[in-house]
Structures are given as C-alpha cells and as structure tokens.
Image: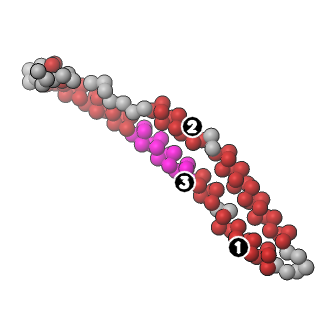
C-alpha cells in the first residue's frame, strides 16, 4: 500500500515563505526600539510630560514585533514537528498494512485482490 503521504515539500515551501518575512519583522522590531529610545529627546526644560506620555505609549507597542516573531516561530516549529510525525506515522501505517497483508496472504485468509482499490466492486 503506497497511498500514504504528506506533502512534505509543500510544507517546506510554506515554511520557507514564512521565513522570508523574518527580516521585515526584525526591521520593525529595530525601528520601534529606535523610536522608543528617541523618547529621551522629548524632555525639554526639565519637563518630562511628553517623554512620559511617549514612553507609556510606546512601551506596549514595542513588544508587538517580538511577540509576533515568537508566535510565528512557534507555529512554524509546530508545523514542522507535525509534518515529521505525520510522515513517520504514514510510513509506519504503510509498513503495518503491508505486513498485515503479507501475513493474511500467507495464512490463506484473503487473496491479493481483497487489498486492491477495486475490492468488492462488481
């Protein structure tokens, strides 16, 4: 039985396409970090109201690109692991089915035709 498969190449293409956006997220992370650091220049004449407002505004937002990168990396890793598990499982199921078919045939339980895709059709 050789009908078991997972499109591992398709998964690899998907993960590769996801990986190509990595530099964009890294750039966004760097840009927002630079913007956060620019808040130091917002204190004028000892007054820090604007600087404090900027720091408060940018604080949560500066975490977003890193969080997105982390989530994308975690999802890509999960897809990779799942694909490997499916491929291994498909291969094992194929081996188990082939072994069961051979055992049944050697015991005279079922003829080869019973395992074909057209089995039972008239």
116 relative to 71, above or below = above
Residue that label 2 marks:
16
Residue that label 3 marks:
71
Neighbor class of circle 3 (other Cα within 10 Å; few <14, some 14-19, many 20+) is few
Query: Which dot marks residue 56?
Result: 1
Residue drawn at x 57%, y 42% as measured from the top left = 18
Q: In the image, is residue 118 part of the stretch drawn in magenta?
A: no
Query: Residue 68: where, in percent of width, then height?
Result: 59, 55
- Upstream in sequence: badge 1 or badge 2: 2
Neighbor class of circle 2 (other Cα within 10 Å; few <14, some 14-19, many 20+) is few
Query: Residue 77: where, in percent of width, then height?
Result: 50, 45
**45 sits to left or right of 39:** right
Quarter in which the N terminus is drawn: top left
**38 sits to left or right of 81:** right
Magenta extent: 70-85
Q: CA distance from mark 1 to mark 3?
A: 24 Å
Query: Which dot marks residue 97?
Result: none
For the stretch drawn in magenta, what is the main secondary structure? helix
Which of the two residues, 67 or 107, is positioned nearer the viewer here?
67
Residue drawn at x 12%, y 25% as measured from the top left = 120
């Amino acid at each position: 039985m050789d009908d078991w498969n997972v499109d591992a190449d398709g998964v690899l293409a998907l993960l590769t396409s996801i990986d190509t956006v990595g530099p964009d997220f890294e750039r966004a992370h760097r840009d927002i970090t630079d913007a956060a650091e620019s808040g130091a220049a917002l204190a004028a004449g000892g007054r820090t109201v604007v600087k404090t407002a900027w720091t408060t505004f940018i604080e949560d937002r500066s975490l977003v690109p890193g969080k997105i990168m982390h989530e994308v990396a975690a999802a890509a890793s999960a897809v990779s692991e799942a694909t490997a598990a499916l491929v291994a499982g498909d291969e094992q199921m194929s081996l188990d089915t082939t072994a069961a078919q051979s055992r049944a045939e050697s015991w005279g339980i079922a003829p080869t035709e019973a395992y074909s895709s057209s089995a039972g059709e008239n």
